[in-house]
Amino acid sequence: MPFIDESPTMSPSLCARGPDGEAISPVPPEGLLPGGHIEKGLEMKKLVLSGFLASEEIYINQLEALLLPMRPLKATATTSQPVLTIQQVETIFYKIQDIFEIHKEFYDALLPHIQQWDEKVAVGHLFKKLASQLGVYKAFVDNYKTAVETAEKCSQANTQFQKISENLKVKGPKDSKDCTTNVTMEALLYKPIDRVTRSTLVLHDLLKHTPKDHPDFPLLQDALRISQNFLSSINEEIDPRRTAITTPKGEARQLVKDGFLVEMLEGSRKLRHVFLFTDLLLCAKMKKTSAGRQQQYECKWYIPLADLTFQLLDDSDVCPHIQVLPEHEIEEIKIKISVIKSDIQKEKKALKGQSRNVERLRKKMNEQESWLLLHSPTIPFRIHNKHGKSYLFLLSSDYERSEWRESIQKLQKKDLQTCQLSSVELQVLTSSCCKLRTVHNIPVTSNKDDEETSGLYGFLHVIVHSAKGFKESANLYCTLCLCVLFRSVLYPVSVSCSDLYCTLEVDSYGYFVSKAKTRVFRDTTEPQWNEEFEIELEGSQCLRILCYEKCYDKTKLNKDNNEIVDIIMGKGQVQLDPQTVQSKNWHVDVIEMNGIKVEFSMKFTSRDLSLKRTPSKKQSGVFGVKISIVTKRERSKVPYIVRQCIEEVEKRGIDEVGIYRISGVATDIQALKAAFDTNSKDILVMLNDMDINAIAGTLKLYFRELPEPLLTDRLYPAFMEGIALSDPAAKENCMMHLLRSLPDPNLITFLSLLEHLKRVADKEPINKMSLHNLGTVFGPTLLRPSESEVTKGHITLASDIWSHDVMAQVSVTWVQVLLYYLQHPPISFAELKRNTLYFSTDV
């Protein structure tokens, strides 16, 4: 027997049931309805009560289904193998027991009155008592969002709890003991919130059919007043009430996820707001409205989830080419944003600073950040309507793509029916998006309040130690992958689930970028990486870790970029709390993801500490030793370490995506540093075996640890002033003269590095490293102010020198200096020395 529909208006055909299972007939005895209006009203009152009692029985069964796993979960929480902690159990099931007892008592008291119905029966006192206990619901509502989030996190971290939460069994009415329905925990946790509204609607109906002189009338009035006041007080606090609408069929269509995505449309990028509902995916565009008017959306398209598929890899249709802007254009916009940020800070500090100027600058920064958000994403995410066309989005990170895919697939596990919306229904749904949305603005810093944290600027050191729990997850994911790739037909293919690695992402300028990657750990389900990375942060607030299984099957190509797709085994993220990470000690943490636990450590170095150079009297080794001492000792023009690292990068790393940008493993870099410092005989063997990113990192570390930057402390102010010259001829004379003024070892080494970086940039279509990108990486390493320059006041106020806005602006100039030489025609050492220009170094 199917469940009774729980719509707010109960059908007269609904009935409640007595203790023996016998139906309580809602149909009035024959001959009673033709009587007076009072008799009719009282009989309608009985019909309303009978229907409400039937729905109350269902509600109690739903609460009971929630309580069923709570008790064993709480019991195992104190054992050696808990599924959840006591705190997690109490958070997820908060006040459910109390709510169950309140409604069970109400149901048991109301049932006999319906069974022995006559015009004198009074039930108002029961409803008033029920209304007076709404304080329990207030506590539930206050905790609701935390409960749902906790349940979701626990499901991701524990497969056993995930199975429990997705398959809760709700009993049917008493005369259908064998009838149960599977319902998710998330759906059941929403029922108490929905129940408050329904109870209020029933009180309206009861008052409508209760004579004013009936003893129930004032009691029902009091109950209604209490209920309405309660609803008013919590209306703005209940997220689900703001993220759900009712369809014409009376079904709840709830918003599950929304966010801004970039859609590729006929070769152009369009910023869209995408809404994932429980039964469809809707893509909308924000309409332009005049100031003061309410924002509105225009629906571009929608796909019922029952018809949505992810593009299969063997489809024959041709995918459009994804146009990617040169990296230097992206970097130039970042530079402009940094300059505007600095200007805003100056305006705020100025005594006569006007808010109008600040608003103008904010608007300008919003335009630049919006442009960056639109043109930075490059990772394809294609969805397909099996009855129509395909749509292509571009995302900034694999993490984000995985989240959207998993959210859609989770909803598709339910028994979905194709929903076709009429033009009126579509208009109503689109109009509701403004109220339902959870993401109100595009994720740019210009939309943030001044009080909001600006994130961390500097370097985050992360050690990825190890991971456990891959075995179970790997088998599951491999099976799913095979089903997708071969149209749900499982062929006898041997699948290896033991080649594992992690990537690290951080947020910057409103979107996430991949910053580091561990080595692939083979033939194990418990990898022990113990790899350290140094990640540059630019206003970052979050660190993400993704775990992959390496895929070698060339049939598993992504049609949009023709690259083999490795399988995401799990993903997780952690907030970068300044108080936690800004410590001299390592902070150890664990991220749980899909049954996998990844252990890592991190600590943060602020930009001021990372850029300050410490004087060194070291004479042995090469790191931290003046370049003139090293070249004299080696009897060479360019230090051996520079020559060997350049040679190795050009031999096998020039095609590596992100070379010099992707962090190498810190332990490998330290091993190479020690080998070069001790002039080890094994250097060449180590270079040949070492990961190429570690070799690139060693070269960067060598220049960073020089006691004086390669372009020298003495010439720093002249470089800063020379690059600021407007006249091209004057700038050329100045910049060339400054090079001639460098000591010979510095100059020859710098020219060797320039030519190497130009050769790397020639491979930009493959390695994605433009001249501008390389300038951004090496600029702050080769040219920095000495402590004396700071105290002399060459760079703003000493107290402000290391603030991130000022540093960003100064760093821009360092990049511009290096970029000038990188973009210059080949510069010959001999030619520089032959030409004599009459130009003083004291510019």
Image (cartoon, rainbow, N blue to C red):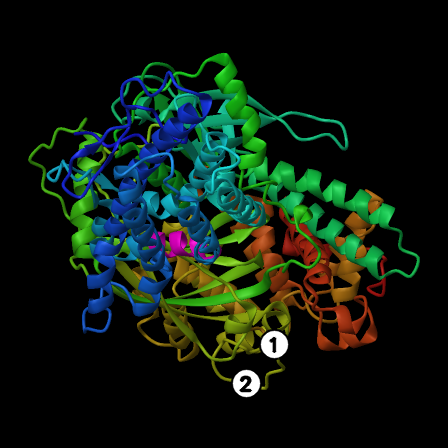
Identified at 30% across, 22% down, the residue is 417
- The residue that disc 1 covers is 707
Q: Quadrant of residue 579?
A: bottom right
Q: Residue at x 32, y 21 (%)?
A: 307
**Taken as a whole, is the magenta stretch helix, strand or loop?**
helix
Q: Is residue 145 magenta?
A: yes
> Mark 2 = which residue?
618
Compared with 661, 288 (above or below) is: above
| Residue nearer the viewer, 776 or 170 | 170
Q: Residues within 10 Å of mark 1 (few under 14, many from 20)?
A: many
Amino acid on which the number 1 mark rests in the picture: Pro
User: To which quarter of the image does residue 556 belong?
Assistant: top left
> Is 752 part of what is drawn in magenta?
no
Return the residue nearer the eye: 258 or 279. 279
Identify the secondary structure beneath mark 1: loop
Which percent across, then down, holds residue 513?
A: 48, 49
Residue at the image position 35 percent from the left and 32 percent from the top? 46
In this view, which residue lies farthest toward the right? 352
Q: Earlier in the sequence, mark 2 or mark 1?
A: 2
Mark 2–mark 1 distance (CA, rounded to whole Å): 9 Å
Look at the image and give the residue range highlighted in magenta: 142-153
Task: State the residue in front, 364 or 278.
Answer: 278
